[in-house]
Image: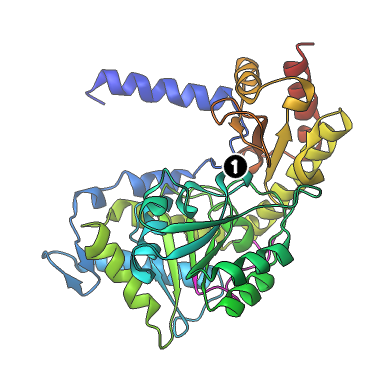
């Protein structure tokens, strides 16, 4: 590389990643093939529009790239192209979620989403997000006793507030989600059911976590977490008389963005093919086994695990119960070579900048080959770092 400053920084980041133990729940490690596609000449092509309906010439190749990515996405999740449509152009998860709002809602409509401090995402209607500024969030959360979803309470809220859309799927909720219960609640109040499976998409693809597609109207996902692809997003829409698929496409382009990043689309296509392999199914199961082993050992060492455990790749640990703030815990672990993120826990009394918890995820270390015994050793290392032993 001629730009030695950037080359030096890239090498420094490569070294950092190689050295660190990565427990960031929203990060993973892509293959060389994904990196090759992401850094390819497809970067040079402007492809505003959709396959066969572009606004520039020279799209004969990138049309095939986009169509292939869509075909692989549908095939990976066992979806019929007669029943489902997928948009591969959204640049990341937040823009993908915003596109759904723009497509299906009028300004001010009520959206029922999980509170940020209880495990929801900013784009599920939080007030600091555009989704909370232009639409009205009807928040829901977890039971104070079990720290898990209370579906009867969700139903009561939905019937009282009558939201236009209900969002299921979270950024910091470790337990299995009952998609059918969400569908029943959405039907009871006449709402769209949108599932944001960004964190668990790879687990769903690998058959290690129940699929939401039997019940959802819209499914969004990032491609860079458990799915182990480049940073990007997919929006799946049910094909029926409501024409959700056409509304979604119009919301993405021309509604919110111009030309797609075709190098990104190609890299997503590569990752989708990798996720369809038998090896990936084994990987997805191992991710959950590792998370459960890590949670169990931390619990054994005296740390309070939110909801008592995990059914996914994600673990929330209450460090404040041991007299440690989330920021302090994150900093102490980074000093020990373990990367996590500070995170609010349900009913957190501490501020977001220094919450009561930390969030751990096992997708990245599982990609590197970690097994349950490694997680047990890692839990002990975490314990030593936090207790300054």
Q: Kindly tell me whether residue 92 is visible in this rendering.
A: no
Image quadrant for the C terminus?
top right
Instruction: Say above or below: 165 vs 385.
Output: below
Q: Magenta stretch mostly in which secondary structure?
A: loop
Q: Give the side of residue 160 with respect to residue 129, left or right.
A: right
The residue closer to the viewer here, 197 or 277, is 197
Q: Residues within 10 Å of mark 1 (few under 14, many from 20)?
A: many
Which x, y percent locates residue 216? 55, 73
Image quadrant for the N terminus?
top left
The residue closer to the viewer here, 198 or 10, is 198
The residue pinned by badge 1 equals: 117
Q: How many marks?
A: 1
Instruction: Say above or below: 154 vs 79.
Output: above
Which x, y percent locates residue 47? 20, 60
Q: Which residues are magenta?
A: 206-218
Which x, y percent locates residue 330? 62, 23
Secondary-structure class at tag 1: helix
Residue for point 44% across, 56% down: 270
Q: Kindly tell me whether residue 25 is visible in this rendering.
A: yes
The residue closer to the viewer here, 244 or 265, is 244
Q: Give the side of residue 89 with respect to residue 365, left or right.
A: left
Instruction: Say above or below: 186 vs 372.
Output: below
Residue for point 64% across, 69% down: 182
């Amino acid at each position: 590389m001629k730009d030695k400053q950037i080359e030096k920084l890239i090498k420094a980041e490569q070294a950092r990643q190689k050295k660190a133990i990565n427990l960031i729940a929203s990060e993973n490690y892509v293959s060389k093939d994904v990196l090759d596609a992401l850094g390819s000449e497809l970067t040079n092509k402007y492809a505003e529009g959709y396959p066969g309906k572009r606004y520039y010439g020279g799209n004969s190749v990138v049309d095939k790239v986009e169509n292939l990515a869509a075909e692989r996405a549908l095939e990976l999740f066992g979806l019929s192209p007669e029943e489902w449509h997928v948009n591969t152009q959204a640049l990341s998860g937040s823009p993908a979620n915003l596109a759904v709002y723009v497509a299906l809602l009028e300004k001010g409509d009520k959206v029922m989403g999980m509170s940020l401090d209880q495990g929801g995402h900013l784009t599920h209607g939080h007030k600091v997000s555009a989704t909370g500024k232009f639409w009205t969030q009807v928040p829901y959360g977890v039971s104070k006793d079990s720290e898990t979803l209370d579906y009867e309470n969700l139903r009561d809220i939905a019937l009282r507030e009558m939201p236009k859309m209900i969002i299921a799927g979270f950024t910091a909720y470790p337990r299995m989600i009952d998609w059918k219960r969400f569908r029943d609640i959405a039907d009871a109040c006449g709402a769209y059911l949108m599932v944001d499976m960004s964190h668990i998409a790879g687990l769903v693809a690998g058959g290690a976590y129940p699929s939401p597609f039997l019940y959802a109207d819209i499914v969004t996902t990032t491609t860079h977490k458990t799915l182990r692809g480049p940073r990007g997003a997919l929006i799946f829409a049910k094909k029926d008389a409501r024409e959700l698929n056409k509304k979604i496409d119009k919301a993405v382009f021309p509604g919110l963005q111009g030309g797609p990043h075709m190098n990104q689309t190609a890299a997503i296509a590569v990752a989708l093919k990798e996720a369809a392999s038998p090896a990936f199914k084994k990987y997805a199961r191992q991710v959950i086994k590792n998370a459960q082993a890590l949670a169990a050992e931390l619990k054994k060492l005296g740390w309070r695990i939110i909801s008592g455990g995990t059914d996914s790749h994600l673990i929330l640990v209450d460090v404040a119960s041991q007299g440690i703030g989330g920021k302090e815990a994150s900093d102490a672990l980074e000093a020990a070579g373990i990367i996590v993120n500070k995170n609010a826990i349900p009913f957190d009394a501490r501020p977001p900048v220094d919450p009561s918890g930390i969030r751990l995820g096992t997708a990245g270390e599982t990609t590197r080959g970690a097994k349950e015994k490694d997680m047990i050793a890692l839990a002990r290392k975490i314990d030593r770092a936090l207790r300054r032993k």
